[in-house]
Image (cartoon, rainbow, N blue to C red):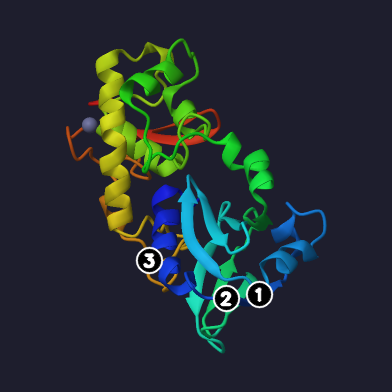
Amino acid sequence: MPELPEVETTRRHLAPVLEGATIVSAEVRRPRMVRRHERPGDFADRVLGRRVDRVGRHGKFLLTGLEGDITWVTHLGMSGRMSVNRPGDPEAPHTNVVIRLDSGSEVRMVDPRTFGFVAAFTPEELARTLVGRIGPDAYESLPTSRRLGDSLARRTAPIKALLLDQRVVSGLGNIYVDEILHRARLRPDRPAGSLDQTEVKRLRAAIGPVLSAGIRDGGTSLDDLAYLLPDGRTGEYTARLRAYGREGEQCRRCGGVIVRSTIRARSSYWCPGCQA
Ligand SMILES: [Zn+2]
C-alpha cells in the first residue's frame, strides 16, 4: 500500500504538471472511485474548469487545491498509483480516472483493487471527513518526543499498531513502520505504554531519516509493481529495506535473522537480535 514516501514522491511529480494548469475534463470510469460523493457526477462537476493552485499532501492523502476553495482529494488505497501522460499514450489496465489539462497533459489514476478514491471537497467537507480526523503528518509536522510520548503513555496496544493508527501520526503504513522500529531497535509487539523516555526519543529520531530516505529513493515498489512513480519508473527504496519482507535473511545491523510475526493481523518483520 502506498505510504507517505510513495505519496510524497507522487506529489513531487504531479506538482509541476498540475500547478497553474486548468482542468478541462475529468473522466471517472468506475463510480466506486467517487464513492465519497452522493452523486457520481459531483466530482467532475466540481473540478471542471478550475485552475490548480497547489498540490499538497497530508499523511497518505494528496490534497490538490483548486481555485474557488475546492480541494481535489486523492487516496491511493491499497494498489493505486498516478501517472502523467500525453494524450494517446497507451493506457495501463485499470485506468479508472483521467484528468485532462489545458496544457495537453493527462493525469491518470490506475487502481486495480479500487480501494483508492478521488473526491472534490469544500473546506467544511474536508475538515469533517478527512483532515480533521487524522493526526499530524509524520514528515512535515512530526510531534515532539514529549507529545509522542503522551500519545503512547498507558496504551497497552502494540507500538506497531499505534504507529499505524493515522490519528497518532499520519502517513505511516506496514513497510515504513517495520523499518522505523528496526532503526529504533524496538520490537513491534512492545506495549506502546512500556516505552521509556529514551526509547520514545529513539523512536521519534528514527522516523525522519527513514521517511527521507524513502522519499529520496522514490518510494518502495514491491514485486507486484502496484506502485510506480508517475513517470513509470520503480521506487528504489526496496533495495534498502532492512526489515520489511526479509524473513529468514540476515540482519544488516547485528547479523541475527529477521523473523516475521503477525501483529493485529499484519505481517511484521523484525530482528530478535537487536530489537528489544
Ligand atoms: Zn539485528
What numbered label is drawn on residue 116? none
Q: In terms of sequence position, does the residue under pointer 1 or pointer 3 come before the other? A: 1
Q: CA distance from mark 3 to mark 2?
A: 29 Å
Indicate the amino acid at tag 1.
Gly
User: Mark 1 falls on what kind of element?
Assistant: loop
- Looking at this rendering, what residue extends furthest in the bottom direction? 88
Q: In terms of sequence position, does the residue under pointer 2 or pointer 1 come before the other? A: 2
User: Mark 3 falls on what kind of element?
Assistant: loop
User: Mark 2 falls on what kind of element?
Assistant: loop
Query: Which picture quadrant has residue 251?
Result: top left
In the rendered image, residue 84, in percent from the top left (x then y), is placed at: 48, 75
- Quadrant assignment for ligand 1: top left
What numbered label is drawn on residue 234? 3
Q: Could you say which is closer to the camera, residue 235 or residue 65?
A: 65
Q: Are marks 3 and 2 in contact (CB under 8 Å)?
A: no
In the rendered image, residue 3, in percent from the top left (x then y), is placed at: 45, 48
Indicate the amino acid at tag 2.
Thr
- Look at 25% across and 42% down and name the residue there: 209
Indicate the amino acid at tag 3.
Thr
Label 2, on which residue? Answer: 22
Judge whether 11 appears above or below 203 on screen: below
Q: Could you say which is closer to the camera, residue 14 or residue 258?
A: 14
Q: Are marks 2 and 1 in contact (CB under 8 Å)?
A: yes
Judge whether 122 appears above or below 140 on screen: below
Q: CA distance from mark 1 to mark 3?
A: 33 Å
Q: Marks 1 and 3: which is nearer the front?
A: 1
Query: Which picture quadrant has residue 76?
Result: bottom right
Label 1, on which residue? Answer: 49
User: Relative to residue 209, is residue 35 drawn left or right?
Assistant: right
- Looking at this rendering, what residue extends furthest in the front direction? 68
Judge whether 43 appears above or below 90 on screen: above
